[in-house]
Image (cartoon, helix red, strand yellow):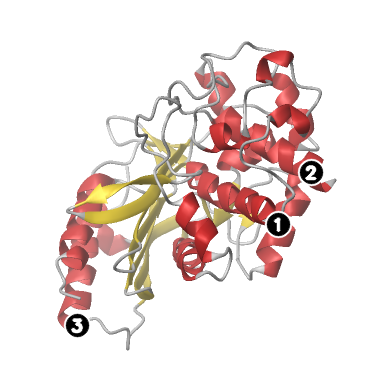
C-alpha cells in the first residue's frame, strides 16, 4: 500500500512574480496537496501556467519505491501518448521546411509500403484518419521487448496488415500511424528518428529524451501499476523502440508545459504552422474531428483548448493548454491505475480558468 502523505518527502517550486494573485497560488497549493493522496500515484508531478508563465510546479511522493527515492520536479516521467504532439511538431517543422508534404502519399517517402497505402497521406496519419490498425492485444501494445534500430525497421511489424478503413473516411486512434510518420521523417532526412528528435530538442533547447530501455536516462522514474485494491506492483519491462514517435519521450511536467508555450509563441514553428496544427481537422465528407495535426483539440467552458492524454504500463499523463489565455496544465504520474486525476484536473481548471484576465 502507498504510505500516507505525511510520510512522503515533498519538494516544491513555486515561481512567484508571475502576475497571479498570491491567494490563487495558495489555493493551488492547498488543492493539490489535499487531493494528491486520493490519486494513489506513487509519484505525481504537477505544472500549471497562467498567462504563459509557470506559476506552480510541484512534485509529490516517490520516484523509486524500492530505493525510497523521493520524486522531485527534476525527475523525468514517461510521457506516453503526450509524445504524439511532440512528434507532430517535429513533423510539422519538416513540412514547414519542405522536407515533407501534408497531402502527398506516404508511399512517396516509403515506397516499400504495400500498394494499399497509396492514398494515405501525412495529414491522414497526423489526424488518425489513415486506417492503419491499432494494437491487437495487451501484449502487443504494452510489452514488446524487441529493440529496433530505427522506426523504418520497426514498422515492418505491422505494415503488411490491411488498412481498417478507406483513408479520410473516419477517425480511429492509431499509435502505429505515428510510427509511420517517424519512418517517413527518417526517409526524408536520411537520419533515424532517434537522431532527428535529439537534434530537434538541441536546436530548440527542449529538455526531453527518448525512453530508451537500453540507455541510462538521468532522473527517469520507475514505473508502477496499481490494482483495484490499491496494491502497487512494478510495471513489467518493455521496449518502446517500436513506437518511439507515439509514446517514446520522457521529461519533466514543467519542461513539457514550457515546450507547449514555446510552440504557441512561435519560437519553434511559424505562427501560421502552429495555427494549422492546432485547428480541428475534418473528414473527407466535411464532418469535424477532435484532432488537429497530431494534437487533440476542443473547448472547455468556452475556452479553446489543445491537449492530449497519455497511458502506458507505469505512466499516466495529461496535457491541457488554452492558447487564448495562456493557461496550461501538465500532470504526470509514474503509475497506471491512478484514480481521481480527472477530479484534480477539474479542480485546477476551476481555480485558473475562473480568474479574470
**Sequence-first disc among 2 and 1:** 1
Q: Say which of 351 and 101 sits in front.
A: 101
Foreground tag (2 vs 3): 2
Q: How much space separates mark 2 and mark 3, taking CA atoms? A: 48 Å
Q: Residue furthest bottom?
A: 17
Disc assigned to residue 97: 1
Q: Say which of 1 and 48 sits in front.
A: 48
Residue that appears at 78% across and 52% down: 195
Q: How much space separates mark 2 and mark 1, taking CA atoms? A: 11 Å
Answer above or below: position of 309 versus 346.
above
Residue 144 placement, left or right of 335: right
Q: Quadrant of the rendered structure where residue 36 is?
A: bottom left
Residue 186 placement, left or right of 310: right
**Sequence-first disc among 1 and 3:** 3
Disc assigned to residue 21: 3
Regarding mark 3 in the picture, which secondary structure is present there? loop
The picture places residue 251, in percent across and down from the top left corner, at 55, 58
Answer above or below: position of 276 versus 242.
below
Disc assigned to residue 188: 2
Q: Say which of 41 and 66 sits in front.
A: 41
Amino acid at each position: 500500500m502507498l504510505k500516507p502523505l505525511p510520510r512522503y518527502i515533498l519538494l516544491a517550486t513555486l515561481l512567484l512574480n508571475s502576475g497571479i494573485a498570491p491567494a490563487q497560488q495558495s489555493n493551488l497549493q492547498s488543492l493539490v496537496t489535499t487531493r494528491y493522496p486520493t490519486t494513489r500515484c506513487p509519484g505525481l508531478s504537477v505544472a500549471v501556467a497562467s498567462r504563459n508563465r509557470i506559476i506552480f510546479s510541484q512534485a509529490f511522493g516517490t520516484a523509486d519505491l524500492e530505493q525510497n527515492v523521493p520524486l522531485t520536479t527534476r525527475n523525468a516521467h514517461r510521457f506516453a501518448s503526450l509524445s504524439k504532439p511532440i512528434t507532430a511538431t517535429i513533423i510539422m517543422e519538416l513540412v514547414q521546411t519542405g522536407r515533407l508534404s501534408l497531402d502527398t502519399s506516404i508511399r512517396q517517402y516509403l515506397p516499400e509500403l504495400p500498394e494499399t497505402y497509396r492514398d494515405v497521406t501525412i495529414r491522414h496519419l497526423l489526424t488518425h484518419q489513415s486506417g492503419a490498425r491499432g494494437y491487437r492485444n495487451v501484449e502487443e501494445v504494452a510489452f514488446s521487448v524487441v529493440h529496433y534500430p530505427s522506426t523504418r525497421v520497426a514498422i515492418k511489424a505491422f505494415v503488411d496488415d490491411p488498412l481498417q478503413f478507406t483513408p479520410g473516411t473516419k477517425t480511429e486512434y492509431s499509435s502505429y500511424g505515428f510510427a509511420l510518420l517517424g519512418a517517413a521523417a527518417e526517409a526524408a532526412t536520411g537520419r533515424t528518428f532517434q537522431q532527428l528528435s535529439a537534434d530537434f530538442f538541441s536546436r530548440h533547447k527542449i529538455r526531453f529524451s527518448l525512453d530508451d530501455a537500453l540507455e541510462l536516462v538521468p532522473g527517469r522514474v520507475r514505473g508502477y501499476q496499481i490494482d483495484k485494491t490499491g496494491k502497487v506492483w512494478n510495471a513489467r519491462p518493455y521496449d518502446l523502440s517500436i513506437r518511439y514517435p507515439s509514446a517514446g519521450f520522457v521529461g519533466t511536467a514543467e519542461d513539457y508545459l514550457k515546450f507547449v508555450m514555446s510552440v504557441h509563441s512561435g519560437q519553434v514553428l511559424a505562427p501560421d504552422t502552429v495555427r494549422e496544427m492546432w485547428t480541428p481537422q475534418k473528414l473527407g465528407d466535411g464532418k469535424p474531428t477532435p484532432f488537429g495535426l497530431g494534437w487533440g483539440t476542443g473547448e472547455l467552458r468556452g475556452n479553446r483548448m489543445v491537449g492530449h492524454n497519455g497511458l502506458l504500463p507505469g505512466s499516466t499523463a495529461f496535457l491541457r493548454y488554452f492558447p487564448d489565455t495562456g493557461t496550461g496544465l501538465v500532470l504526470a504520474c509514474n503509475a497506471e491505475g491512478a484514480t481521481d486525476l480527472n477530479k484534480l484536473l477539474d479542480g485546477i481548471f476551476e481555480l485558473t480558468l475562473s480568474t479574470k484576465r
